[in-house]
Amino acid sequence: MERNGSASTSTSSLFLDRVGEVAVTLDPDGLSWKPIDRESSGSSCLCMNYRLKTENRIEFSNVYAVELIDWGLIEDANRNSGSFFSGNKFEMYRFVVHGFHTGKTHGSPWTLCEYTFGHKDMLICQSWVEHLIASTNNDAVRPKSLLVFVHPLCGKGNGVKTWETVAPIFSHAKVQTEVTVTQRAGHAFDCIASLSHRELSSFDGIVAVGGDGLFNEVLNGLLSSRHDAPFPPSPQELDNKSDKNCQHLNNDISRGRASLNGANGMLSAPLCGSDDLEPLLSAVESNGLGVSKCTTNNGPCNADEDVKVSFPNDWFRVGLIPAGSTDAIVISTTGTRDPVTSALHIILGKKVSLDIAQVVRWKTSPSSTEVPSVRYAASFAGYGFYGDVIKESEGYRWMGPKRYDFAGTVAFLKHRSYEAKVTFLKTEEQETSNIANDIQTSQLYQKNSKNVVCHANCSICNDFKDAAQHSADVAVSPIHSQDSRWLEYKGHFLSVGAAIISCRNERAPKGLVAEAHLADGFLHLILIKDCPHPLYLWHLINLKRGSNPFDFTFVEHHKTTAFTFVSSHNESVWNVDGEILQACQVSVQVCRGLINLFASGPEV
């Protein structure tokens, strides 16, 4: 390897498989190569005379592995035959550069590529490998050891096949993986919750191969005994508050802004998070203090205090390789639903903070007296229509992902509304800029709107990242029941939904809430008041088309950090990231940037 001018640039003559002899240049940003024209230079090195018309290059940011593969064949492209398969073959020492190409448009999957170089001198190959490895490990802290859970029955039952597709990528990158194929409901939760702090700290992260349901199970197993935060106020605490503002809903929809002219299209429930329901996660066992019990077959976990793992945590990351039915979390955080792209995000050590909702169930039914229990959600928690869909789909698992379309149609035709009381914390942003927010929301659904939705290197989400770097404690501040900004809504609702992220999916291309960010510390409360079938149908069609779903008088949309919910219904069912949670009294609060995800945010 020779130095050319600059100390940071090196050039050498190597052989590139199926091309021929090339001049390879290593610079601070990448690797480039150009065929050597032997006819003009007079060189006869192995008689290589194939000329490639264009120079080729790969950036170090697009290299995920470099491997020395020892002695073997390198093929020269034969210019005269016009076929790669009839060229000369030579034996030499070889090394492979594994990389990928990003798509030209946002949402395009990343495609794998590899380049095999060779030389007669093994020391030269070793030197190139060492330099390339040193150059490609500068961008981020790449994981070295991962705990992987594979859901074999998620989506169309392709969980194991999906893992087998991406496993060689991890092998090339020398990432050690401890793989468990889940065998029953709650298997991943039990395994993760029972890990000691020392055992968990031996991994750089946990990867779920499945859908949003498995990710929720991994999330709850990780946080159940490792996240210590005060509960949000209970509905009873807010009832005892004397200066509470109360707004009663007006269910008169005669002043609706939209008409049904031109409404058409197939009816399907634009669900987020409800993709793979197996295994279902039972309610986390709680000790009533906001910290769930961690037990193993031999009793409580023996945690080592010197390596205690708690959250928020700057180094530990969670990954998701999509194999589910909707994969809303992956689409919302990477911009595409592609297992290879997600695997590359993990291997490259990408990191983005993710808000998590803490859902506290105070009562299962109006007459129950159980202690509070905690669940965590990464994408969505919904009641009414969304709970009905998830409950209805239980009897049609044999249909696969299509069961959600069927269950959504059944729930729509039943058109059930529920009497409930929702109390939420009004934000300072809402108090000062309601009109501006309405205008911004409308612009979000225009084709030419820019710099509004969350994206890679999002400035809004990076504000939290910058603050976290200067503070060891980024936990959510306690929310007080005596805050004067609590607002109460009473009425009949078709649905009550809380979106933590945009929840983009194939049924709702812009998501339930296009303006939602990954780590801004807010959730979006969506209240759908009782209304006639046609108007609700148009609301669902707008979600499917990517039009504004809030442009109706029967739809309330509020950006908040916490809310409570009370219903007198005996069978109140919530959809929490696609998992069933029966609860008639809940409190929900956002924990900003509680976990880090192996992702970089969607490209726009």
Image: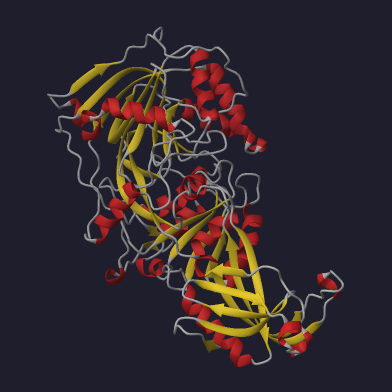
Q: Position of residue 163 (x, y in %)?
A: 61, 59
Picture residue at 58% right of the left edge, 27% below the top: 268
Residue 122, compared with residue 485, is above or below; it is below
Residue 179, compared with residue 432, is above or below; it is below
Residue 584, compared with residue 250, is above or below; it is below
Residue 525, compared with residue 108, is above or below; it is above
Q: Position of residue 46 (x, y in %)?
A: 77, 88
Tell me which colouring the rendered structure shows: secondary structure
Q: Position of residue 291 (x, y in %)?
A: 29, 51
**Residue lying farthest to the top in this orientation:** 254
Q: Position of residue 280 (x, y in %)?
A: 51, 43
Q: Please name whichever residue, 362 or 121, is drawn nearer the observer in this view of the structure.
A: 121
Picture residue at 46% right of the left edge, 68% below the top: 143
Picture residue at 44% right of the left edge, 55% below the top: 600
Picture residue at 27% right of the left edge, 72% below the top: 306
Q: How many marks?
A: 0
Q: Is residue 367 visible?
A: no
Q: Quadrant of residue 487?
A: top left
Q: Please name whichever residue, 32 or 180, is drawn nearer the observer in this view of the structure.
A: 32
Q: Please name whichever residue, 191 or 485, is drawn nearer the observer in this view of the structure.
A: 485
Q: Quadrant of residue 564?
A: top left
Q: Quadrant of residue 275?
A: top right
Q: Would you say 266 lies left or right of 374 here?
A: right
Q: Would you say 169 lies left or right of 551 here?
A: right
Q: Would you say 471 lies left or right of 455 here?
A: left
Q: Please name whichever residue, 40 or 247, is drawn nearer the observer in this view of the structure.
A: 40
**Residue lying farthest to the left in this orientation:** 242
Q: Is residue 199 visible?
A: yes
- Where the N terminus falls, by quadrant? bottom right
